[in-house]
Image (tube, rainbow, N blue to C red):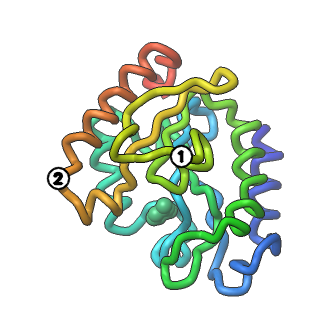
Amino acid sequence: MEQLWEQMKMSLQKCERCGLCRTRTQAVWGVGNPRTRVLLVGEAPGKNEDEQGEPFVGRSGQLLDKMLAVVDLDRKRNIYITNIVKCRPPENRDPAPEEVAACLGYLREQTRILEPRIIVCLGRISATRIIDPGFKVTREHGQWVEKGGIHMMGTFHPAALLRNPGNKPAALADFLGLREKIRQLCPEVYEL
Ligand code: URA
C-alpha cells in the first residue's frame, strides 16, 4: 500500500490532465497519516500551499489546525488532509468544473487506498462533489450521510470562517460531532 501511495504521489507531480499544470509551482498530494480512517477534503491549494507543497498551510490552515486540536485530531498523527483539486487555480479562483473532473481520479485513488470510514468535506466545492450536487453549507453543515459504507459530513471552509467568524461556533459543533462519529466508528484513530 505504501509503495503504491508513494508512486502515485510522485506521478502526480508530472500530471498534465488539466491546464493548471502550466501555472502551478507543484501539485499538492496531501498531508497526514495514511493509516488513518478519517479523510478531510478541501477545495484546492492556494498560494502558500502551491509554494510549500502541503494543504492548508496559510491562515485558514492555522484555523483548521486549532479546530482539529479541540477534538484531539492532528494532521501529523491521526487524519489525512487533501483537496478536490491538487493544483492551484490562478488568482485563487474557484476550480473550473473541467479541472475538478480531470483531478477527481486522484481523490478516488486516494480513497481506494486509504479506505476511510469518515470523510469531512471542507466547504461547498468539496461537499457538492462528494456528498450532493445541491449541498448548501449553511443549511446542511454537520449533517451525516452514509454512502457505500463511508460516513460523510460537510462543514464550513476555514477560509469562509475567517471571513465570517460568526459561524465559528457552528463549525466547532460540527467538529464535536466528528469526534463522536470517530468514537463510534473507528475509535482506533485516537490511538494513532
Ligand atoms: N484552501 C483549500 O481548500 N485547500 C488548501 O489546501 C488551502 C486552502
Q: Is 136 positioned to the left or the right of 28 in the image?
A: left
Residue 145, horizontal then vertical, whole percent = 52, 26
- Kindly identify the residue that appears in the image at 80 percent across and 55 percent down: 8
Of residue 84 and residue 185, the one placed in the foreground of this image is 84
- Where residue 98 appears, x then y in whole percent? 73, 68
Tell me the quadrant of the picture where the N terminus can be found.
top right
Question: Tag count in the figure?
Answer: 2
Vertical placement of residue 39 versus 53, above or below: above
State the residue position of label 1: 134
Where in the figure is residue 80, as x and y percent of width and height?
A: 55, 43
Which residue is denoted by mark 2 in the rendering? 166
Q: Residue at x 35, y 52 (%)?
A: 64
Q: Secondary structure at mark 2?
A: helix
Q: Amino acid at mark 2?
A: Gly
Residue ID at (63%, 62%): 85
Image position of 41 with respect to 24: above or below: above
**Above or below, 137 relative to 55:** above
Of the residues under marks 2 and 1, which one precedes in the sequence? 1
**What residue appears at the point 74 percent right and 45 percent down from the top-left corner?**
108
Residue 51 shown left or right of residue 56 in the figure: right
Residue type at tag 1: Gly
Say whether marks 2 and 1 touch (CB < 8 Å). Answer: no
- Is residue 51 shown above or below 33? below
Could you give the CA–CA distance between mark 2 and mark 1, rounded to whole angstroms? 24 Å
- Label 2 crowding class (10 Å Cα cut-off): few <14, some 14-19, many 20+? few
